[in-house]
Image: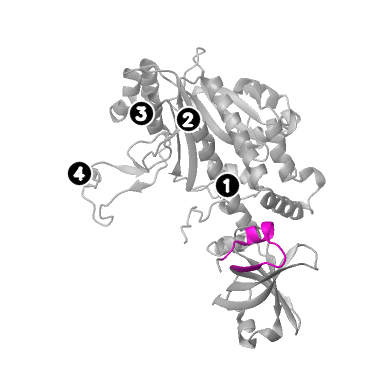
């Protein structure tokens, strides 16, 4: 018989039908006469209960079926007498596919800390929490591709190895085949990258944006969805050295068009999650509730599903950076000196400021626009006031900034002037400047950090728990 997924058995299985199920044992309990095995194959948060008549099976076989073991079960579906499931499977045939020594298998049926599970990241997928997180992550990746495909965007694969630094940050991982113990040197004692594989210094990409602009200024609308890398020594719950970015770039879009797309895009993905991941979301919502039950009520998070519906059902407030500074400087936390970071025009807003605007002042998602040009990248559209640029950041409750974007500067002269001011060598960016020399048009784009978005959708508190194998300072395990 063909194996059926547990998700399909629980959804469509009829009492009296014979099925084959395969999976991993979550728990086994019972008496001398009957064993109850909770079986899960990763297709759903829910387990299939296997009822085993002890007298019908070899004692050694049953002794070896422990938590973590993989088994195959053939049997008849029956209506369940117990609570929690409509049907269960009476086992007629049991096969142990792979044993798991209970003295060595680390994921036993008890409460494990998230830190312990990070140390065992290769096995944490077998827990309810992480199976839910990674099913949702898959669903959101699919929803993103679905959204842009239906909008007529082209999926562009931008390079992972690059010689440019799109952000101008300089915090990049070097890519080289030179002997680190004895690299070739130039006459002035510098490493001679002309002898390296690519003939020049190269790095892992921090963004596919600049290459994405090239595609948009020919294909109209493109998006990238790929890994990006930052060599920031930030050991926090919000930073990774390797993460995934979604970066659409659109020709003939001004800043308003860009904001409209970002809002519609986020709402579309959240709608998909609510329509297709409800069982996993309910589990994670209850998990979060239990985790925070010891906190004072005013410090607890909004219910996860309510939070998602709240974003879906509210228009995003749009204000300028200057207006945001005024609101913050007139706020109670500022007047009572409760903000950790300064609130001055010209400084970048911190997460505490962004979350105040979203969670306390407006109580809905916010899009901030028109930031000071000195705290933004060289490629952003320069406003007529000479002080600000056509940037936009989307701020979400519990997260702060979730999207950053801008209208791009299409004027060659202004772009070259800004690059000089920021010491970006024009000769290295000549390919990029060609898009402004030949048929330049207004265009815009933004970037969404995929893991930050998954943090929001799942309610998890640490970004290391929404990517399969986190890469962080001093950690490149698995």
Q: Nearer the viewer, mark 1 or mark 4?
A: 1
Q: Does the magenta stretch include residue 9?
A: yes
Marks 3/1: CA–CA distance = 39 Å
Marks 1/4: CA–CA distance = 51 Å
Q: Which of pointers 1 and 4 lies earlier in the amino acid sequence?
A: 1
Q: In this view, does 310 lie above or below 384?
A: below
The secondary structure type at the circle numbered 1 is: helix
Q: Nearer the viewer, mark 3 or mark 1?
A: 1
Q: Which of pointers 1 and 2 lies earlier in the amino acid sequence?
A: 1
Q: In this view, does 433 lie above or below 133?
A: above
Q: Which of pointers 2 and 3 lies earlier in the amino acid sequence?
A: 2
**Tag 3 residue:** 424
169 sits to left or right of 15 = left
> Count of labels shown?
4
**Tag 1 residue:** 139
Rendered location of residue 148, percent (x, y): 51, 34
Rendered location of residue 4, percent (x, y): 59, 63
Q: In this view, does 418 lie above or below 121?
A: above
Q: Report the span colored magenta.
A: 3-22
Marks 1/2: CA–CA distance = 20 Å
Rendered location of residue 166, percent (x, y): 40, 34
For residue 61, the mark is none
The secondary structure type at the circle numbered 4 is: loop
Q: Which of marks 1 and 2 is in front?
A: 2
Marks 4/3: CA–CA distance = 23 Å
**Tag 4 residue:** 186
Confirm whether residue 3 shows in the render.
yes
Q: Which of marks 2 and 3 is in front?
A: 2
The secondary structure type at the circle numbered 2 is: loop
């Amino acid at each position: 018989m063909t194996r059926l997924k547990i998700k399909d058995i629980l959804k469509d299985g009829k009492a009296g039908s014979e099925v084959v199920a395969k999976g991993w044992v979550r728990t086994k309990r019972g008496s001398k006469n009957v064993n109850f095995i909770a079986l899960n194959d990763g297709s759903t948060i829910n387990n299939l209960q296997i009822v085993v008549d002890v007298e019908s099976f070899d004692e050694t076989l049953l002794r070896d079926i422990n938590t973590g073991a993989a088994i195959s079960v053939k049997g008849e579906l029956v209506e369940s007498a117990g609570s929690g499931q409509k049907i269960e499977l009476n086992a007629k045939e049991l096969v142990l596919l792979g044993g798991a020594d209970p003295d060595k298998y680390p994921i036993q049926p008890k409460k494990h800390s998230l830190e312990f599970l990070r140390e065992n990241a290769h096995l944490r997928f077998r827990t309810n929490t992480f199976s839910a997180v990674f099913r949702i992550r898959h669903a959101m990746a699919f929803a993103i591709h679905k959204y842009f495909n239906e909008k007529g965007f082209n999926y562009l694969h931008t390079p992972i190895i690059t010689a440019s630094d799109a952000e101008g940050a300089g915090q990049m991982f070097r890519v080289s085949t030179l002997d680190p113990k004895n690299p070739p040197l130039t006459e002035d004692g510098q490493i001679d990258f002309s002898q390296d594989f690519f003939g020049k210094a190269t790095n892992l990409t921090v963004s596919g944006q600049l290459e994405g602009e090239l595609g948009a200024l020919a294909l109209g609308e493109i998006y990238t969805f790929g890994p990006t890398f930052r060599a920031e020594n930030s050991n926090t719950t919000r930073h990774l050295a390797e993460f995934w970015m979604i970066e659409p770039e659109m020709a003939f879009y001004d800043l308003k068009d860009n904001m409209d797309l970002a809002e519609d895009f986020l709402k579309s993905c959240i709608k998909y999650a609510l329509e297709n991941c409800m069982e996993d979301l309910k589990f994670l919502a209850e998990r979060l509730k239990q985790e925070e039950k010891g906190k004072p009520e005013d410090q607890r998070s909004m219910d996860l599903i309510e939070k998602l519906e709240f974003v879906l059902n509210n228009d995003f407030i749009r204000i300028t950076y200057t207006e945001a500074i005024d609101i913050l400087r007139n706020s109670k936390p500022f007047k009572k000196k409760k903000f950790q970071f300064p609130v001055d025009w010209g400084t970048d807003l911190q997460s505490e400021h962004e979350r105040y605007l979203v969670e306390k002042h407006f109580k809905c998602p916010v899009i901030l626009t028109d930031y000071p040009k000195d705290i933004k990248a060289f490629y952003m559209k320069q406003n007529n006031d000479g002080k600000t640029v056509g940037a936009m950041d989307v701020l979400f409750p519990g997260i702060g900034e979730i999207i950053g974007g801008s209208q791009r500067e299409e004027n060659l002269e202004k772009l070259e002037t800004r690059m000089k001011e920021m010491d970006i060598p024009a000769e290295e960016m000549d390919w990029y400047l060609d898009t402004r020399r030949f048929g330049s048009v207004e265009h815009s784009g933004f970037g969404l950090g995929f893991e930050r978005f998954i943090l929001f959708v799942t309610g998890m508190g640490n970004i290391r728990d929404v990517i399969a194998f986190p890469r962080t300072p001093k950690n490149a395990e698995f």
